[in-house]
Structures are given as structure tokens and as C-alpha cells.
């Protein structure tokens, strides 16, 4: 029974639906596209079509010179466990050979060495395969102020080199160029450089541009600057035959006004909205921002609190908008102070000084990258080829250290989401699942983790390449509905079939037990692969048949009693063997405690032919109790003259006072030892007759 009718709530719900739709338009969620881990800035006049390959060679050269093996690399960066790594070349080579063979004990026996070795090897592989992920041709700080004819020529020549690299497929996966700012002093020069570059590029490629391709606008202060760049790109694309929307915008947050505007609100989101969908990323400039808030050069550093505040405001303003964020750079370059030539090589002291300077710059850059990753910034600036190994080392360590925890969380999150959707509950927390999935997508894209390591989460390669958490959940629900996918292992299909039979709300306690067993089996399947046939049959058969598996019986091990030895008797002669066999049998029947101690034995033949044995008394046991115990257990028989046991004494004697039970007698003895007097005898029955028969004490 309700109070409000559909007519009453129709207008309110309609307004709410429109507001929700507008919110989804502003915040579509994190992008599913690949995000580079860094952006390499360099002067536009220095750019060549094969620049990425050359920078990769310079990075490997610096790595070979200042860190020839993984141990020296880990010591320079002070990675976890670097103190335990060897220093001599022979020991490092032996440890490298041990780590390079097999996968059995790397994570347990050589944990610090495994991490350093894996990071080092994957960094070298990355520098040889894809040394640069994003390149930015710079016409601002990295280029300087030059005469207009010179900058015009460099804009045209740089566009020609980009066209050559596009044809030869030697460009980095991401590329773009940075123009000067749209301030009053530089706006005319910036627009001219933009026009010349795009016009020359379209003329060489026939209107084709690299995908993705962006124009970086530095020192943004007001939304009108971003809107002006978007208008210019609209006109250039239309007149040059470039696909509409092919050229994106990358804004740089380097001023306090781009963080908090004149109205006191967050200005970052307003800048993004002014681009009308063209803004794809936003980069933070640490040193320009800290200088504008009056922080002196001595304290302008990457980890300053003012810089962290700007990062957090920028992060909050662009969360779930689909715009990627990028952190700033480390300005201290890993370049040694001494230069050697063929005629005059460096002395050992000069080489040591160069190594110390480079390692110090490496450690600073490494700490800055780790700081950015801990704050949720997965992309940053690199200004020198010697910084590339450090960028990848910090990123790879970050992903490898978090791999196990992220795998477990994503595995449980997918199962929970699929279960909630399967039983009809509303599941609207897909953003969290997409964030966990993006961790693996970023790690695989940059080379930090392999696809095989990502498969430990239980997702398939097709699901990974789909890059959508919502699609993964839908596939799981469909698989559960039909009992498993056709392309998966049959045992996995049987395990997933539990969802068709019962839900946790309707299942009986026994059925819940079977469902839990199947869920555990499914998790084991994801971690270890298909089960062995015998293991799969033993676990699945009881659940499929609808009956509980028989519990495993635990048999108590009965150890043989020690054989007593007497003087003059050989070890093989054991007259108590029959007694020991009877005792073991009694133990198994539960009639005797385990391993009663046999103090002594005697083999004697009475005139009546009975054998008498002496067995140790149990605590609080009388001689007669021991005989009864052995007789009932079948160990021995009482003598013929003692087989007729006398009747038990009456609980009360003629005076009405009987013997106290054993427990009360022991209690009275303990009380006497402690100085406490306990009452003697049992309480007599009430009544006049009983009181009359009770002897009266002497008065």
C-alpha cells in the first residue's frame, strides 16, 4: 500500500532523470584508452623521424655505463633489499644465472633479488622495443624565443619529419607539439606556429595526422584561451581536409588561476568544458606554479606541499571526466660533470664523480616518480634520455609490488558483481571495477606486467583487450546462465554451473556447503589452471550427486609398548607379549588410555593354571579397580578364589554415617593440606527416626 501515485511522482522523477543524464554527460568515467607513462619534451628544431630509436640507444648506453647489472641498478635506486645483493661481478653473475632459470623459487628464495632482476630486465627490454611512449615537439621553453623567420622554418621542417615518421611507422605511439601560450605577448606567434605546422603536415600526408595527436597549450589562465584554440582547430581541420576532431588539446596547469579562479571555484573543470570535447589531457607544471605562489627556488621541489595541493585540486576537478592527468618533471639532469674524449679519457676519480652525480640524479627522479604514482598520477615528464630507465624502473616496481593485491581484489570484485547481477540485485559500482581493471591495462601497456600475470585474476585475454569492466561482468553472467563458455575448460564450465541451481537465499545449509566448495574450486582453477582429472572428480562428484562427501577418518596411531628387560633374558623373549596385544586392542576399543605404562611384569603359573600380571595403577585407582578394569577389557582374569566379588557396601552403616565418595574424600584431603576443614560424611536423611539413631556427641 502506497501513498503516492505514479501521477504524483512522474514530474519529479522526470526532472531527476534529466539531471542524471546531464551528470553522465559531464562525468562519463575514466577513459578506456591507453595512457602513456611519460611525455618526453624536446626542442622542435631537434626532432627527427627516428628520434625515438636514438633516444632509446642513449638510454641503454647510460644504463650500461652507470648500472651494468641489476645489483648496481638496485643499489643506486635503493630498492627494497638492495643491502643483501652482492657487489662483486662474479657473485652477481651467479645470482643472475640462478634467477634466469625456471620460475619455481624466485618469489620465495630470492625475493629482493627477484624484484630487482625482473625490473632491470624488463627495463632493458622496454628501451630496446619502445623507448618513448609519448613525444612532444616543443616550441616554448625547450625552444626559446627566436626570430619569426627561424621559427617559421622550424615549424615547417618539424612537420615534415613527423610526416616521414608517420610513413615509416617510426613515431612513438603518442605524439604532439607545444605552442607558445595565448597570453597577450605570445598569442600571435602561437597561432602562426600552429597554422604553419598543421598546414605543412597536411600537405605532406594528404590530410592525415598521427592518431592520437594533440596540441599543448601552456600557462592557461582563463577558459577563453582554450575555447580560442578549439575554434582555430575547427577551422584548420575543415580547410586542410583533416578529420573533424582528430587534433586534440592538452592544457597545462601552471598558474594559480587555473586552479582557483576569480570566483573562488575549481577552474580546472571549466577549462576542460571550454574545449568542447577536444581536451584529452591536462599536465601539471610544478616549478612554474610554485614560482607564481612565491616559493623561492631553494624550496621549489616536486614534493612540496603547495605542489601536492595543486595536484589534488586538479585530480578532484577532472575525476571521472575522461581527461587524463600528467605530472611534472625533474629538472636535475643525470649528466656527469666530466666529459672524456678518445685523446684524453677520464681518470678513475672522474669516473667515480660522474657515477655519484648520475646516481644522485637518478635517485631524485626515482623518488619523484614514486611520489606521483602514490598520488594517482601515472604519467609524467621526462627531459633527458638518461631519465628513461628510471621512469620505467619506478613504474615497473609500482605495478609488480601491487600485482598480487590487485589480482585478488579484481577477482573477488568480478565474482561479487556477477553474482549481484545474476540474482537480480542492482549493481552500480562499475567505476570501482573499471579502476581495478585499468591497473592491469596500464601495467600491460607499459610492459610492467605480462598478460600471463594478468590472467591470474581469472579474466581472459579477450576480456582484457575489451578494456571494459561492464562487458566482463555481462560475459560472466551469460556464462553462468548457460553453464560455462564453449571455449573454456570443461571443468570450469561445471564449476560455474552452480549459479543455475540455487542462490544463497534459497539454498539449504547442505547446498550452501556445496556452493562454497565449488566457489573455492573455481578460484583454485583461476590461480592454478585446469585441475587434474582425479582431483576434479573427487571434489565435484559429491556436489553433483547432492550428497555430502564422507569425512576423512583420523586413526590414532598406537605405538608398541616398550619391552621390559630382565637380567638373563634375551630381547626376543617377551612373556608380556600377550598382555601388550590385549592392551593395544583395548586401546583401539576405547577401554584403556593410550599407552598405559607397564612398570613390571611377571610370568608365573599358579596351581590353578591362571597367569597373573601386574599392571600400573591409574591415578586414584585401587588394586581391586585395576583388576576389574583388566578383567572387563579382556586383558586378564581374576584368580578363581577372587572371581566372586562381594557386594558393594551400603552407603550408610548402622550409625547412619557411611564412607564418603572418592571425589569428596580427595577434596577433604586437599582442604586439610590447605588448612581448611571440610565436613565429614554424607548428609543423613532428614526425619525423626534418623536423628534418633544418630549418636549424640558428648557434651
Image (cartoon, rainbow, N blue to C red):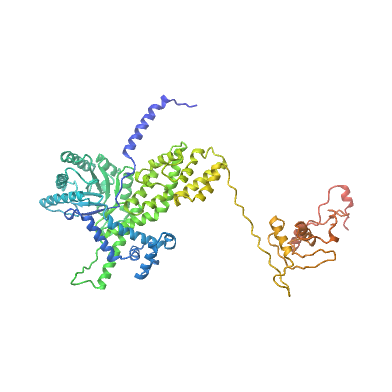
In the rendering, at what x and y percent does residue 409 appear? 43, 48
> How far across and down, in percent of the image, does residue 573 sit?
72, 70
Whether 519 is drawn above or below 385: the answer is above
Asked if residue 629 is positioned above or below residue 207 in the image, the reply reads below
Residue 262 shows up from this direction: no
* Residue 58 visible to an observer of this rendering: yes
Image quadrant where residue 484 sits: top left
**698 or 115, nearer to the observer:** 115
Residue 544 at x, y percent in the picture:
54, 42
From the viewer's side, name the closer residue of 189 and 520: 520
Position of residue 227 relative to residue 303, above or below, is: above
Q: Residue at x 54, y 48 (%)?
A: 538
Q: Quadrant of the C terminus?
A: bottom right
| Circle count | 0
Expressed as whole percent of the image width and height from the top left, the position of residue 139 reads 18, 51
**In the shown orientation, is residue 37 left or right of residue 546?**
left
Amino acid at each position: 500500500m502506497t501513498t503516492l501515485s505514479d501521477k504524483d511522482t512522474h514530474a519529479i522523477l522526470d526532472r531527476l532523470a534529466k539531471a542524471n543524464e546531464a551528470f553522465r554527460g559531464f562525468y562519463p568515467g575514466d577513459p578506456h584508452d591507453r595512457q602513456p607513462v611519460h611525455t618526453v619534451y624536446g626542442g622542435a628544431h631537434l626532432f627527427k623521424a627516428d628520434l625515438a630509436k636514438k633516444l632509446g640507444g642513449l638510454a641503454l648506453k647510460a644504463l650500461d655505463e652507470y648500472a651494468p647489472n641489476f645489483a648496481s641498478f638496485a643499489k643506486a635506486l635503493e630498492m627494497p633489499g638492495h643491502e643483501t645483493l652482492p657487489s662483486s661481478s662474479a657473485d652477481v653473475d651467479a645470482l643472475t644465472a640462478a634467477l634466469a632459470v625456471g620460475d619455481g623459487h624466485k618469489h620465495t628464495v630470492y625475493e629482493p633479488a627477484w624484484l630487482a632482476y625482473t625490473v632491470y630486465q624488463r627495463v632493458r627490454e622496454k628501451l630496446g622495443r619502445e623507448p618513448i611512449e609519448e613525444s612532444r615537439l616543443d616550441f616554448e621553453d625547450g625552444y626559446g624565443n627566436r626570430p619569426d623567420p627561424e621559427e617559421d622554418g622550424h615549424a615547417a621542417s618539424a612537420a615534415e619529419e613527423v610526416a616521414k615518421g608517420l610513413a615509416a611507422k617510426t613515431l612513438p605511439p603518442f605524439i604532439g607539439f607545444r605552442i607558445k601560450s595565448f597570453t597577450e605577448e605570445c598569442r600571435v606567434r602561437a597561432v602562426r606556429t600552429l597554422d604553419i605546422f598543421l598546414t605543412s603536415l597536411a600537405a605532406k600526408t594528404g590530410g592525415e595526422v598521427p592518431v592520437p595527436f594533440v596540441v599543448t597549450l601552456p600557462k592557461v589562465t582563463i577558459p577563453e584561451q582554450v575555447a580560442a584554440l578549439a575554434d582555430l582547430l575547427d577551422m584548420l581541420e575543415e580547410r586542410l581536409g583533416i578529420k573533424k576532431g582528430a587534433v586534440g588539446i592538452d592544457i597545462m596547469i601552471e598558474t594559480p588561476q587555473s586552479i582557483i579562479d576569480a570566483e573562488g571555484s575549481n577552474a580546472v573543470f571549466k577549462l576542460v568544458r571550454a574545449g568542447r570535447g577536444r581536451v584529452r589531457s591536462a599536465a601539471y607544471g610544478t616549478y612554474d606554479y610554485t614560482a607564481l605562489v612565491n616559493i623561492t627556488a631553494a624550496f621549489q621541489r616536486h614534493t612540496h606541499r603547495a605542489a601536492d595541493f595543486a595536484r589534488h585540486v586538479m585530480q578532484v576537478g577532472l575525476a571521472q571526466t575522461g581527461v587524463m592527468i600528467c605530472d611534472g618533471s625533474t629538472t636535475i639532469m643525470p649528466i656527469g660533470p666530466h666529459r672524456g674524449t678518445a685523446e684524453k679519457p677520464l681518470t678513475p676519480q672522474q669516473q667515480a664523480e660522474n657515477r655519484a652525480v648520475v646516481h644522485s640524479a637518478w635517485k631524485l627522479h626515482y623518488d619523484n616518480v614514486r611520489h606521483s604514482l602514490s598520488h594517482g598520477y601515472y604519467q609524467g615528464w621526462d627531459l633527458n634520455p638518461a631519465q628513461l630507465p628510471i621512469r620505467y624502473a619506478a613504474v615497473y616496481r609500482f605495478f609488480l609490488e601491487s600485482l598480487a593485491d590487485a589480482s585478488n581484489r579484481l577477482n573477488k570484485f568480478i565474482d561479487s558483481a556477477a553474482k549481484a547481477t545474476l540474482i537480480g540485485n542492482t549493481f552500480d559500482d562499475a567505476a570501482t571495477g573499471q579502476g581495478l581493471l585499468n591497473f592491469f591495462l596500464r601495467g600491460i601497456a607499459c610492459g610492467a606486467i605480462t598478460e600471463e600475470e594478468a590472467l591470474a585474476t581469472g579474466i581472459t585475454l579477450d576480456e582484457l583487450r575489451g578494456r571494459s569492466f561492464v562487458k566482463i561482468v555481462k560475459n560472466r553472467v551469460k556464462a553462468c546462465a548457460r553453464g560455462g563458455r564453449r571455449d573454456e575448460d570443461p571443468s570450469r564450465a561445471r564449476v560455474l554451473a552452480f549459479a543455475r541451481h540455487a542462490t544463497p537465499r534459497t539454498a539449504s545449509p547442505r547446498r550452501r556447503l556445496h556452493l562454497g566448495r565449488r566457489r573455492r574450486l573455481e578460484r583454485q582453477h583461476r590461480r592454478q589452471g585446469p585441475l587434474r582429472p582425479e582431483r576434479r572428480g573427487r571434489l565435484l562428484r559429491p556436489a553433483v550427486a547432492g550428497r555430502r562427501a564422507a569425512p576423512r577418518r583420523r586413526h590414532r596411531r598406537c605405538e608398541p609398548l616398550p619391552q621390559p628387560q630382565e637380567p638373563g633374558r634375551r630381547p626376543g623373549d617377551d612373556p608380556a607379549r600377550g598382555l601388550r596385544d590385549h592392551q593395544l586392542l583395548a586401546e583401539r576399543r576405547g577401554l584403556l588410555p593410550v599407552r598405559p605404562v607397564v612398570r613390571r611384569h611377571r610370568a608365573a603359573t599358579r596351581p590353578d593354571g591362571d597367569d597373573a600380571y601386574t599392571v600400573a595403577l591409574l591415578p586414584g585407582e585401587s588394586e581391586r579397580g585395576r583388576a576389574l578394569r583388566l578383567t572387563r577389557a579382556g586383558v586378564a582374569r581374576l584368580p578363581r578364589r577372587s572371581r566372586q566379588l562381594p557386594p558393594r557396601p551400603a552407603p550408610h552403616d548402622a550409625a547412619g554415617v557411611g564412607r564418603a565418595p572418592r571425589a569428596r574424600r580427595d577434596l577433604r584431603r586437599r582442604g586439610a593440606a590447605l588448612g581448611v576443614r571440610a565436613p565429614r560424611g554424607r548428609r543423613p536423611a532428614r526425619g525423626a527416626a534418623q536423628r534418633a539413631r544418630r549418636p549424640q556427641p558428648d557434651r
